[in-house]
């Protein structure tokens, strides 16, 4: 071959090579834009493969485990070693997870949260910052979360993944868990359209958590919406504007402003799935928490993502939440709930029709009883042998009548059949919007004497009412309840005020009459598997609200106190004079806006019942105050 022949081909091919290189560069750029930045995504897919039960090993030193137990109800991180297949990660952080695992005295299986980057910021497992293992002891047992998330994902909803895991703790089999993906920064980076989007979480609920507009101050919303991404701080004001849009009265154009702000296509898939699955512990159900809001900053659009889906497939919860009777598939706002977003939808014929069309399709494709029952059976088959050696009881803590997992499955399948039949009839013949039903109300009460009961209850008689203060001794409580009885009623105390949130120590009773004698006591409230659980009571104080005067006011008052005893109707404890309180001319103080807008106590967490307190503080008239006994009304308040 001569030189001319030898070099002619390369010379001729140079333009082609340049063209190919250019094409490759363009292809690489396209791939970089469209694929996940996480190189471990395939392995993550294996870790959350629905048909595979994973095996995970956690090693926690004995002293670290004891610190976790001793710290309860506070949940603290301790160092541990994590292993899955041939991947071993040392110096990870482990803590108990969720309200169901926070009570020191509980005997059931506790959930775990593993955080890989707590001690070393760059630590990851398959690119994940966190993994969690849920105990599956709620109404939905071990089946609700994996089934519901599979349905959401098949619908194209941005949702977390869930399957099963055998958990070994220090080499010993600790039971079958639900392996639940976390919605966090990693989730945003991998699965959501804008990697810089802002993420907010509503866990415990509270003022504004039901998407009710509570004012322009972003700091009021910070109390409820946890900031879960770096950009969330910058977007607090945008969150307020979104909630303002949700609460805006309907105008000409119907859905336009809401559709521009919220991904309604996704929300209209989430709503029926939550309803048909009986996932009542959600914003779309009875309790306004357990969800994330994500803002795509590039598109300026919000996405709703449900979370904590272990409550489902159960009808009458806590003996008073009527999931089937009070959650109409055609009118998807549960009875007695205040949900501005859902109200906006059911009040707009265009939006309501869109929801119903989506609900009908979801019902037939995913909730047909025979098909869904086979899905339950398939999940059970995956873990049946492992459950036989699970060291914990085969029952849900919320359902003491359970015999084993077979009875749990039958109970849930029965719910599926009832839900499908009722929902199909409701969607085919919607009829008028149902009126709220009147049912007996469920009120929390004080428990036996306890160390975390409030103490040092005192009163100050003022011109605008009786101001109460006490010492809060509880941890992780969701609020306090003030009880009151008249002098004639003696030990017949009734709930009159709820103070939501932890660490509350003050209350003001304005529904009082000059010359009347009142008796007060206080207890804290914790969530529990069977609903709200009260601590022991505080000391009891007796207060006279002055004396009647010609002007209708009062002139003086007095306070007595006694030590706490068992909550009963007994009148055997003697009263001891504590102090005499003189009333001075005192201006009426403005009501705290936080109390005015959110004077309700919602028992948060996965056990949340519907019991709540009034939405506003009433300055009752004399006639009103004589009948102002109990204010714990779950059936009529949000």
Image (tube, helix red, strand yellow):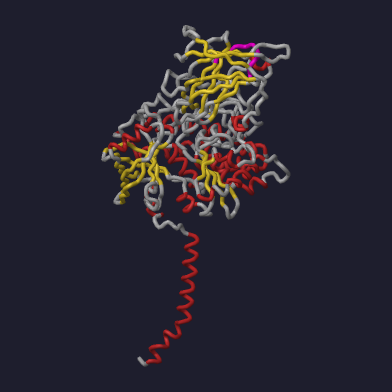
From this viewpoint, is residue 379 visible?
Answer: no
As rendered, which of 359 and 500 lies closer to the eye?
Answer: 500
From this viewpoint, is residue 290 visible?
Answer: yes
Is 516 within the magenta?
A: yes
User: Main SS type for the magenta part?
Assistant: loop
Q: Position of residue 24 (x, y in %)?
A: 46, 71
Q: Which residues are magenta?
A: 511-519
Is 198 within the magenta?
A: no
Name the image quarter holding residue 592: top right
Quarter of the image with the C terminus is top right
Q: Please, is residue 221 above or below residue 502 in the view?
A: below
Q: Please, is residue 350 above or below residue 317 in the view?
A: below
As rendered, which of 506 and 180 lies closer to the eye?
Answer: 506
Q: Position of residue 154 (x, y in %)?
A: 48, 47
Q: How many marks?
A: 0
Query: From this viewpoint, which residue is outermost toward the left?
Result: 171
Name the image quarter holding residue 474: top left
Q: Residue at x 61, y 28 (%)?
A: 615
Q: Please, is residue 580 above or below residue 438 in the view?
A: above
Q: Please, is residue 8 above or below residue 607 in the view?
A: below
Quarter of the image with the N terminus is bottom left
Q: Position of residue 363 (x, y in %)?
A: 53, 39
Q: Position of residue 172 (x, y in %)?
A: 27, 38
Q: Residue at x 60, y 18 (%)?
A: 461
């Amino acid at each position: 071959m001569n030189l001319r022949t030898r070099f002619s081909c390369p010379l001729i091919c140079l333009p082609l090579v340049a063209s190919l290189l250019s094409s490759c560069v363009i292809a690489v750029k396209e791939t970089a834009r469209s694929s996940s930045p996480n190189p471990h995504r395939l392995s993550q897919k294996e870790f959350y493969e629905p048909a595979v039960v994973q095996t995970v090993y956690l090693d926690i030193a004995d002293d670290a485990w004891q610190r976790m137990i001793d710290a309860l109800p506070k949940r603290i991180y301790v160092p541990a070693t994590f292993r899955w297949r041939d991947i071993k990660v040392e110096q990870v952080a482990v803590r108990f997870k969720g309200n169901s695992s926070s009570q020191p005295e509980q005997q059931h299986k506790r959930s775990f949260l593993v955080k890989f980057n707590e001690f070393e910021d760059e630590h990851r497992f398959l690119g994940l910052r966190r993994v969690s293992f849920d105990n599956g002891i709620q109404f939905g047992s071990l089946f609700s979360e994996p089934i519901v998330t599979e349905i959401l994902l098949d619908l194209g909803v941005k949702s977390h993944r869930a399957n099963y895991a055998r958990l070994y703790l220090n080499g010993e089999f600790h039971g079958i868990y639900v392996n639940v993906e976390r919605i966090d920064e990693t989730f945003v980076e991998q699965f959501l359209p804008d990697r810089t989007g802002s993420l907010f979480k509503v866990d415990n609920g509270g003022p504004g958590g039901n998407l009710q507009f509570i004012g322009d101050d972003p700091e009021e919303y910070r109390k409820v919406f946890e900031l879960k991404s770096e950009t969330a701080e910058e977007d607090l004001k945008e969150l307020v504007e979104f909630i303002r849009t949700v609460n805006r009265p309907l105008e000409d154009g119907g859905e336009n402003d809401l559709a521009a702000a919220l991904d309604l296509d996704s929300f209209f898939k989430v709503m029926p799935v939550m309803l048909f699955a009986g996932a009542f512990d959600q914003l779309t159900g009875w309790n306004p928490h357990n969800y994330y809001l994500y803002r795509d900053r590039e598109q300026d659009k919000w996405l709703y993502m449900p979370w904590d889906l272990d409550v489902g497939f159960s009808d009458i919860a806590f003996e008073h939440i009527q999931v089937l009777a009070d959650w109409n598939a055609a009118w998807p706002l549960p009875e007695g709930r205040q949900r501005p977003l859902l109200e906006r939808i059911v009040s707009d014929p265009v939006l309501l029709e869109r929801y119903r069309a989506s609900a009908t399709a979801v019902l037939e494709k995913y909730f047909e009883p025979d098909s869904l029952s086979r899905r339950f059976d398939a999940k059970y088959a995956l873990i049946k042998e492992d459950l036989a050696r699970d060291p914990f009881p085969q029952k849900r803590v919320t359902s003491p009548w359970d015999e084993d997992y077979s009875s749990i499955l039958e109970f849930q399948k029965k719910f599926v059949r009832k839900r499908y039949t009722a929902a199909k009839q409701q969607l085919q013949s919607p009829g008028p919007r149902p009126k709220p039903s009147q049912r007996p109300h469920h009120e929390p009460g004080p428990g036996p004497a306890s160390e975390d009961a409030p103490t040092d209850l005192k009163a100050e008689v003022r011109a605008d009412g009786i101001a109460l203060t006490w010492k809060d001794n509880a941890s992780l409580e969701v609020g306090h309840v003030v009880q009151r009885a008249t002098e004639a009623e003696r030990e017949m105390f009734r709930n009159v005020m709820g103070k939501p949130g932890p660490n509350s120590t003050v209350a003001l009773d304005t529904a009082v009459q000059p010359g009347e004698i009142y008796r007060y006591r206080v207890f804290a409230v914790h969530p529990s598997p069977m609903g709200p659980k009260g601590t022991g009571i505080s000391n009891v104080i007796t207060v006279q609200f002055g004396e009647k005067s010609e002007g209708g006011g009062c002139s003086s008052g007095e306070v007595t106190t006694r030590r706490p005893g068992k909550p009963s109707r007994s009148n055997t404890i003697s009263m001891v004079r504590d102090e005499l309180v003189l009333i001075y001319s005192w201006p009426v103080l403005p009501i705290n806006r936080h109390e005015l807008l959110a004077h309700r106590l919602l028992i948060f967490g996965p056990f949340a019942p519907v019991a709540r307190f009034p939405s506003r503080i009433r300055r009752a008239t004399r006639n009103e105050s004589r009948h102002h006994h109990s204010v714990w009304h779950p059936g009529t308040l949000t």
